[in-house]
Image: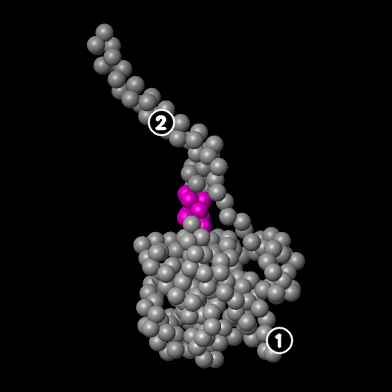
């Protein structure tokens, strides 16, 4: 009898291992997956969206761009390839909501410092004032980590296009054809360059929601890989 059990011991261990894997797969299939919405221009307040794309109901992604950061380096969409990131619009001399927004971005920088999959991106809406030197000074004052967070400047038209046609996060300035009235919005972008969330950047409690939603996106990506392997 003992000889019989020793003979099939390895088989029993293998079968037990397979059982654990099968149960885990079934549990993963049956467990509801929290999924964030994918925002389209038609779902966002018309005040924040360029009129020519307000009707768009699908396939919206953040397009290519080329801007310059606080270190004088070129920042493009490729900088954020396969990354989740939070974007916003500000200017360094703003005395109203910008200091609060920057403070909350600093908070996110701290919370996400050990998460290499997530970056931050802040665009100035006043590039005529916020040149590289001004952004560098601001970055030093706010203790911004340039490996995690880019402050970017560039052509006014490109920043306008990004704000109104890509991130859907700024109002038009009626006194300036390329002017912007930036909002308090933080915008969450996934690794596929899609908009997955909007948050009030002036509220500290909203940063908890940002952190939670980032974890949802990261789990979403892991689940996609897992089920892709199962399908394969």
Name the residue located 69 percent from the left edge and 90 percent from the top edge: 175
In this figure, which residue is indicated by the disc labeled 2?
20
Q: With respect to residue 172, does 21 lie above or below?
A: above
- CA distance for labels 1 and 2: 63 Å
State the image coordinates of residue 80 (x, y, percent, origin top left).
Answer: 48, 67
Q: Over which residues does the magenta segment extend?
A: 213-222
Q: Is residue 62 visible?
A: yes
Q: Residue at x 42, y 73 (%)?
A: 106
State the residue position of label 1: 174
Query: What percent of the width, then of the height, locates residue 57?
Result: 71, 61
Bin the neighbour count of mark 2 within 10 Å (Cα to Cα): few under 14, some 14-19, many 20 and up.
few
Question: Is 22 left, or right, of 6 in this rendering?
Answer: right
Q: Callout 1: few (<14), some (14-19), or many (20+) C-alpha neighbours within 10 Å?
A: few
Which tag, 1 or 2, sits closer to the chain's start?
A: 2
- The tally of labels here is 2
| Mark 1 vs mark 2: in front | 1
């Amino acid at each position: 009898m003992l000889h019989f059990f020793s003979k099939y011991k390895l088989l029993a261990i293998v079968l037990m291992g397979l059982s654990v894997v099968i149960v885990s797969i079934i549990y993963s299939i049956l467990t509801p997956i929290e999924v964030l919405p994918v925002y389209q221009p038609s779902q966002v307040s018309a005040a924040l969206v360029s009129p020519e794309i307000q009707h768009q109901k699908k396939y919206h992604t953040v397009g290519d761009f080329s801007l310059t950061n606080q270190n004088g380096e070129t920042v493009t969409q490729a900088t954020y390839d396969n990354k989740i990131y939070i974007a916003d619009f500000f200017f360094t001399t703003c005395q109203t909501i910008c200091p609060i927004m920057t403070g909350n971005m600093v908070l996110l920088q701290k919370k996400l410092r050990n998460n290499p999959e997530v970056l931050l991106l802040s665009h100035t809406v006043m590039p005529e004032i916020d040149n590289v030197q001004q952004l560098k000074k601001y970055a030093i004052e706010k203790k911004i980590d340039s490996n995690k967070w880019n402050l970017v400047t560039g052509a006014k038209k490109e920043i306008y296009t990004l704000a109104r046609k890509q991130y859907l996060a700024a109002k038009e300035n009626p006194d300036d054809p390329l002017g912007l009235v930036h909002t308090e919005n933080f915008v969450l972008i996934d690794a596929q360059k899609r908009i997955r969330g909007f948050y009030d950047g002036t509220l500290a409690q909203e940063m908890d929601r940002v952190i939670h939603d980032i974890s949802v996106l990261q789990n979403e990506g892991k689940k996609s890989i897992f089920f892709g392997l199962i399908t394969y």
